[in-house]
Image: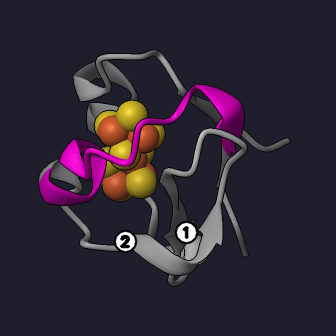
Amino acid sequence: MVKYELKFNDEHCKGCGLCANFCMRNILYLDDERINKSGYNLISITDPALCVGCAYCAIICPDSVIEVKKNG
Ligand code: SF4
Ligand code: SF4
């Protein structure tokens, strides 16, 4: 069951990778196959069910791209 939902404002992402580096579950990665209109690689999630909702990724993002929501 996926307890937390991550929403990315993709067009604001600059592909810095900070969120991926700070994710305690190591489930975020810079995706070579996805880019936004500005040409930056986007973040993808390996397994959303492993997210613990800590929101470190959202806090560390310099561009406020990520929103962490609890499901249910
Ligand atoms: S909320 Fe925490 S566990 Fe979930 S993706 Fe962000 S840093 Fe990783
Ligand atoms: S920290 Fe923010 S700007 Fe950097 S890759 Fe992650 S979502 Fe994109």
Question: Element under label 1?
Answer: strand
**In-image side of 56 versus 22 (left or right):** right
User: Mark 2: which amino acid?
Assistant: Tyr
Residue at horizontal 49 percent and vertical 75 percent from the top: 31
Q: Which residue is mark 1?
A: 44
Q: Which residues are magenta?
A: 7-21
Is residue 49 one of those drawn in magenta? no
Rendered position, 5 above or below 63: below
Q: Is residue 31 above or below residue 65?
A: below
Q: CB of mark 1 within 8 Å of CB of mark 2?
A: yes
Please tell me whether residue 18 belongs to the stretch shown in magenta: yes
Mark 2 crowd level (few <14, some 14–19, many ≥20, 10 Å Cα): some
When the figure is inspected, residue 49 is found, relative to residue 22, above or below; the finding is: below
Quarter of the figure that contains the C terminus: top right
Give neighbour class at mark 1: few <14, some 14-19, many 20+ (Cα, 10 Å). some
- Residue in the image at 45% along x and 61% along y: 51
Q: Which residue is mark 2?
A: 29
Residue 23: quarter of image: bottom left
